Amino acid sequence: MAYSGPAMGSLSAGASASSSTIKQVKLDKESELRIEVANESPLRLRLLNGNAEIFGSELPPGIWLTFPPRLKFAVFSWYGATIEMDGTTETDYVADETPMISYVNVHAVLDGRRNRAKASSNDSEASQGPRVIVVGPTDSGKSTLSRMLLSWAAKQGWKPTFVDLDIGQGSITNPGCIAATPIEMPIDPVEGIPLEIPLVYFFGHTTPSNNVELYKVLVKELAGMLDRQFAGNAESRASGMVINTMGWIEGVGYDLLLHAIHTFKANVVLVLGQEKLWSMLKKEVSKREPAVDVVKLQKSGGVVNRNAKYRQRSRSYRIREYFYGLTNDLSPHSNVASFSDLFVYRIGGGPQAPRSALPIGAEPAADPTRIVAVNINGDLLHSVLAVSFAKDPEEIISSNVAGFIYVTDVDIQRKKITYMAPSAGDLPGKYLIVGSLTWLET
């Protein structure tokens, strides 16, 4: 992800910047203004004249937009524009060398494929639009390119499906999830991905290495569900999908990339920022899937490397945003439940077979997809739990989730658990899933 996404806001949209300064920036043709908002203050920005876009979404003329602290983004202009900023930035500068021409050329090719798919609606195979998977190392701009391709497609009237396999950050919902959602309008440059009807599967951890087999199973579940939806919706099928992936590209990470390409039946692989990965995938994918195009793209010079501490902070803001909204405009509800009212499960653990059934000397291995009941105790404090739609514990892996709760107190003596939920009322399911995802509310 080149820019860190809009998940880091903790001030209201009306908050004023400290030591506010107003300045105008002129953008020439095919140049961009790269901005990192100050750590403590939001930044207001508007388009005075010309045309400009952020992540592929056009800026409305003359309207102030408020960007939260710590956000990194770029304002690009195809034909020239004047931008006005009110507030403080860590950095802001204009760059005239960008890979945008190559990115929009990719969009044009994908648009042509969508039109051909729409014209072939009677042929199920030919009516499948582009299934684009964006791959590359950490901090190569994958999320940013995904957003651009989605917004440009939506601007043309398509409704592409966005699939996010990056459990480390989470562009659609909380970290620790793989998710998909249709994109019907260009993505709002401040609000980000719309959350009306996401399809979410809870992995529960921020790296696949915690349970590689479970990650693969959930990727397969999500792909299967989308295939069933596409089968009955010609518009979605022709619009295709854009799949964002994680930055783990070596060893097991590379195997998981190949698994995602195969499972989602991707027919376009966009490789950002690494020649070696492009060469390996071109050789491997052409051997397996002759109809797949593997395209090498340059990463943007605006890409910012983010350390582990920054990523952890980003995850924390993302979870906070889920409960409180981008600008603190939501009011989560505190609820109390008896231990007996909720059933908490963990996926993975316990031996696959009893020791007696194994060869002599062999040790029992943990079953990565075993559903294990978890006792409600103090260990759940500060955990983020997923609320499953499953009607039975055995359905937990194959079921998507309705949302999340945050455990704020566990009273062992009274056998009561206090949790925060986005809305009041009963939970939509009684089965909860716990992983290693935690959050300390500040």
Image (cartoon, rainbow, N blue to C red):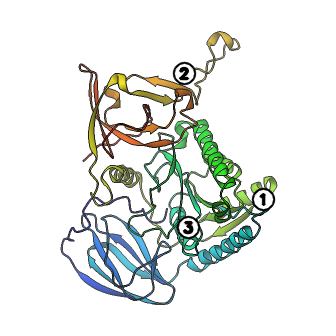
Question: Which residue sits at x=56%, y=31%?
Answer: 395
**Mark 1 or mark 2: which comes first in sequence?**
1
Q: How crowded is mark 1: few (under 14 residues within 10 Å), some or many (20 or more)?
A: few
Type of the residue with mark 1:
Glu
Tell me the SS state at disc 3: helix
In x, y percent, where is residue 221? 62, 42
Q: Is residue 334 above or below residue 91?
A: above
- Sequence-earlier tag: 3 or 2: 3
Q: Which amino acid does label 3 sit on?
A: Leu
In this view, 123 is above or below 254: below
Query: Which residue is denoted by mark 1 in the rendering?
Result: 125
Q: Nearer the viewer, mark 3 or mark 2?
A: 3
The answer to whether residue 135 is seen in the rendering is no
103 or 323, which lies in front? Answer: 323
Whether residue 344 is visible: yes
CA neighbours of label 3 inside 10 A, class few (<14), some (14 to 19), many (20+): many
| Relative horizontal placement of residue 245, taking residue 7 as reference (left or right) | right
Kindly identify which numbered label has been placed on residue 359: none
Residue for badge 2: 350
Which is nearer the eye, 254 or 177? 177
**How much space separates mark 3 and mark 2, taking CA atoms?**
42 Å
On the image, the x and y values in percent for residue 370 come to 56, 26
Query: From the viewer's perspective, is residue 205 above or below residue 369?
Result: below
Answer with mark 3 or mark 1, whichever residue precedes in sequence: 1
The residue at 60%/77% (across/down) is: 104
Q: Name the residue under label 3.
A: 150
